[in-house]
Image (cartoon, grey):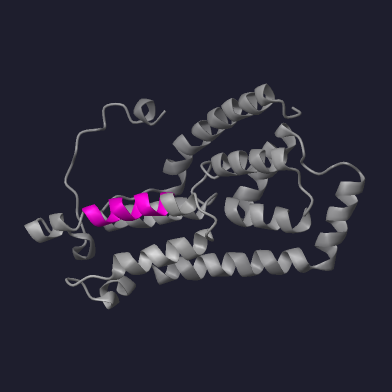
Amino acid sequence: MISVLWRGRWTPGPCQVDDAVAVDSDDKSIHFTWKPWLAVLALLALFSTPLPRELSALALAVLVMASRHHASRDYIGAVDWNLLLLFVGLFIVTGAASELPWAQHHAAQLAAQGLLPDTALSLAGASLLGSNLIGNVPFVMLLLQVWPDIRSPTLQALALLSTLSGNLLIVSSVVNLVVAESARRYGVTVGFFQFARVGIPVTLLSMTVALGWLWWMGMPP
């Protein structure tokens, strides 16, 4: 889809890169490229053990930060604190909303009337709506808190459909904003309508394929 919409515009042009992301091409920088790959392999191995995943990730992060050539403050200085603040704010607001009496009341009413999104199509519609109102990750967290007895097949469908629905608009997922901010540092501007031009068809096509897959796997349509 991207190749079709931007046909003939794949020739590299001049790129203005901020000093903060300028790549050092000396031999020393090449020496450190093996550490992330080794950390990824170790993390995948730890994920297959009973150890808590968050502790495994934190332990490996500490090991990666241990370096004789780079100070820890350099790593900490590269953290996008504004992004972390955005995540924290989203989760606080979502958690507070799920604790409101009216949220619990309406969720119970929907469950009693059989209107919870427990089919593929209803879950796809809820994912598209929720992702573009509050983001796909906060939507999933909110849904899990007001619908605690959700079945395993519905959880799997929710993971699939909410992830794909995050591609619709640039505000559908925080990850989209992360990429847009990173692109800006390289002199590339990703606008709302520019993103939607490819995000809408990609999302609709991929979710159609996903719905067909869920139907084939036996989830109620």
**Residue at the (27%, 71%) spot, across then down:** 66
Q: Quadrant of the N terminus?
A: top left
Dominant secondary structure, magenta:
helix
Q: Which residues are magenta?
A: 34-44
How many numbered marks are there?
A: 0
One can see residue 10 in this view: yes
- Foreground pick, 125 / 192: 125
- Foreground pick, 13 / 148: 148
**Residue at the (19%, 49%) spot, across then down:** 15
Q: Is residue 42 above or below residue 98?
A: above
Whole-percent x, y for residue 158 in the image: 65, 42
Q: Is residue 43 magenta?
A: yes
**Residue at the (44%, 43%) spot, across then down:** 195
One can see residue 26 in this view: no
Whole-percent x, y for residue 9 in the image: 26, 32
Whole-percent x, y for residue 118 in the image: 77, 39
Residue 87 in the figure: left or right of residue 217: left
Q: Is residue 213 above or below residue 64?
A: above
- Foreground pick, 184 / 191: 184
Which residue is situated farthest in the left direction here? Answer: 26
Whole-percent x, y for residue 105 in the image: 87, 60
- Foreground pick, 145 / 42: 42
Residue 59 in the figure: left or right of residue 89: left
- Quadrant location of residue 72? bottom left
Q: Quadrant of the C terminus?
A: top right
Residue 62 in the figure: left or right of residue 159: left
**Residue at the (14%, 57%) spot, across then down:** 31
Q: Is residue 96 magenta?
A: no
